[in-house]
Amino acid sequence: MESVTQPLAAALRQNPPPPTPPLHHRILTATALPHLKQIHAKIVRSGLRLPASFVSRLLDASYSSPSSSSLDYVLSVLIHYHTSSSPLVNRSLCTLARAAHPPWTLATYGRLRRAGIGIDRFSLPAVLRAAAKCRDTTSAVVREVHGLSAKMGFDADAFVQTAVVGAYAALGQTADARGVFDRMIHRDLVAWSVMLDGYCQSGCYNEALLLFDEMRSSGVVPDTVILATILSACGRAKNLALGEAVHSFILESNISFDAYLHSTLISMYANCGLIDTAQSLYDEMLPKNQVASTAMFFAYAKLGQIETARNIFDQMADKDLVCWTAMISGYAESDQPNAALKLFNEMQLLGVKPDEITMLSVISACANLGALDQAKGVHIFVNRNGFDHVLSIRNALIDMYSKCGSLADACRVFNEITGKNVITWTSMITGFALHGNGRSAIALFDQMVAEGIMPNGVTFISLLYACSHTGLVEEGRRIFQSMVDVYNIEPKHEHYSCMVDLLGRAKLLQEALELIESMPFAPNVVVWGSLLGACKIHGDIELGELVAKKLLELNPDHDGAYVLLSNIYAKASRWDDVRQVRKLMKNKGVLKEAGFSWIELNGHVHEFMMGDKSHPRSSDIYGTLDEVVKELELVGYSPDTKAVLVDLEEEEKREAVLLHSEKLALSLGLINSTRGSCIRIAKNLRICEDCHSFMKLASKVFEREIVLRDRTRFHHFKDGVCSCGDYW
């Protein structure tokens, strides 16, 4: 045995093993949590006290890739670490607050408090920041931390109190935030900035502007961040006077225009409608950044100058998601849903992933287009890309399917939603209203109230709309009265407009006029327009003239007033008066909105104007239309020339009424469908009496269901009957 060990001992003396690294060095070089756990075990077995460097390194390793297990482990170490070292506690909370999972910060805070670990003024802001990011469950946490700060004597600590203001404001509790802010002894620039930003984030723009005046009166000089916040508020509140005053202050104070401040100034002028001033500032900006360019093209889009908006968009070298979303939204809000959907497809091809805001704009565009195939494609995209859990998107899907003519799909989405809010219920009620199903709308409203969901003003607009298009006069009166008596909701212009429409359609024109005269505020063009529309339906010339005069006093360029008055005269064959109205329109430069219809076939949308011959299959369409007319005439159809509201010879009127855009769309639909199928058509104006009769007969003779959406509602034609019951 000795002969073996002696050479080994000699070898070890010549080549000794490397010395074991000092503990401090091993802690600093550890890169993963498992390695640190091994070191921890060795320290415990050795009976040594945990060094602060180990706890610090453990925090770094655990929070770099946090998980529930690592969080539990590090909290156990921190709680059993025998020291009242506040810096480590603060570091733990601050690190977690900046991580992607702020709820863990709150869990850590709760564990530390229960374990009696010391919390100081540097710990509380981290907890408040985390609470502000967890909007659903943290109002109580903010109040608890606020109370603790007062108990610990931090009422006069600007650092802590500013964090409290920021947390309340982030949760939308601006009244609580302002209460804390007003009680602060020392309000520095950061505190003012947090409160102002809180107002703006909550949409309280006028309150932000008043607070800014108070700030200046108190002698606090705003910095560029605050000035940008206020300019943004001016733009949102359309307060041009204050926006210009802030601009003058910037110039007089020789404050340097950084890119953000310059962009916000452009946005303010654009939002206030001074597009020329915004454009001048934009031209001066070199280089142009995304914020400014986005503000410019979105402003042009809102003004209807969509081509100018698209030119700016196309010139942008780098486009982020905000840019794409703004341009898609611009198209959607400019009644160009096809362009919005096309741009969305381009965005996907370039690998730009949409967010919830993008999807809401896309769903809105699809709803406006009324194309069911594309709607279903968007729904599939929503499900595949993880948006199906977002309540606002699911609510929008209900609206989309309703406007695309599929009440069954809208109901399916509605029934699948758990945790419905008032918007969910209102969207479904609106769907029933659009499809003329007033009884179902009222029944759903009763169910909603029974489940404890309180209606809002929009809910009642939908209910009254449903009653109006179903002739439910008594129900409408009861619902209108219940707004004030039961739900304490004061009727606005929109509610009065629905009631006037309800009464007017039911030929209760005098009662509708009396309701307008009893309004607690002056009627607007929408209210008078509802009554004028009823006068046109029932041919009341005398009242129509009076109402048109009232409407044109409010808006001399209102094309609808001229058109409806002209139509009232035309129905009474007062052609001289028709010519007089049209001459007046021409002299004032008022243009009548052109009517058009569209139909979706195999994912493509085909549009038609009256007498349109631009379609590639125009000859087939007109050939089919001739055949359809002949077939319908065999079962009693005769063109209703009263629907032609211009002075023509009878034969010319007959030809004109047969060339309405929805008839052309139907002809294309018949070419591309088989018996028993469904043809879906949309029209931007109200369907005329002749086309309504035409569709009813066509649905029976050609054995198709025809779903037609006009400006106000859906008509489901089947077996010679329309869902509206000829009441529209």
Image (cartoon, rainbow, N blue to C red):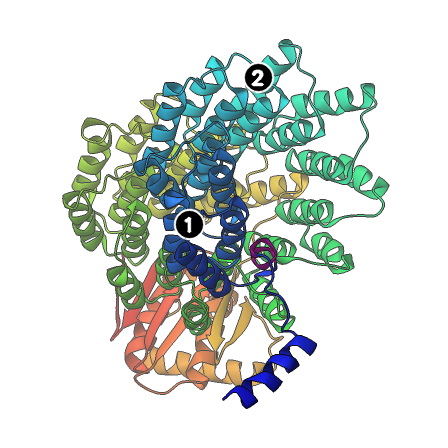
Left or right of residue 62, residue 500 in this image: left
Which residue occupies 50% across, 70% down? 659
Quadrant where the image shows the C terminus: bottom left
Find residue 688 and report its image quarter. Answer: bottom left
Helix, strand or loop for disc 1: helix
Which residue appears farthest toward the front when viewing the image? 2
Q: Earlier in the sequence, mark 2 or mark 1?
A: 2
Neighbour tally class for label 2: few under 14, some 14-19, many 20 plus, Cα within 10 Å: some
Q: Position of residue 689 (x, y in %)?
A: 37, 60
**Magenta region includes residue 382:** no
Q: Which amino acid does the dot numbered 1 rest on?
A: Lys
Above or below: residue 239 compared with residue 651: above
* Residue 39 x, y percent position in the rendering: 48, 60
Q: In this picture, is 669 found above or below 101? A: below
**Dot 2: element:** loop
Which labelled disc corresponds to residue 187?
2
* Numbered range of the magenta stretch: 23-28
Residue 238 visible (yes or no)? yes
Query: Residue at image x 58%, y 34%?
Result: 236
> Mark 1 — residue?
571
- Foreground residue among 308 and 252: 252
Q: Is residue 14 left or right of residue 671?
A: right
Picture residue at 35% right of the left edge, 47% below the top: 537
Give percent across and percent down for residue 567: 46, 48
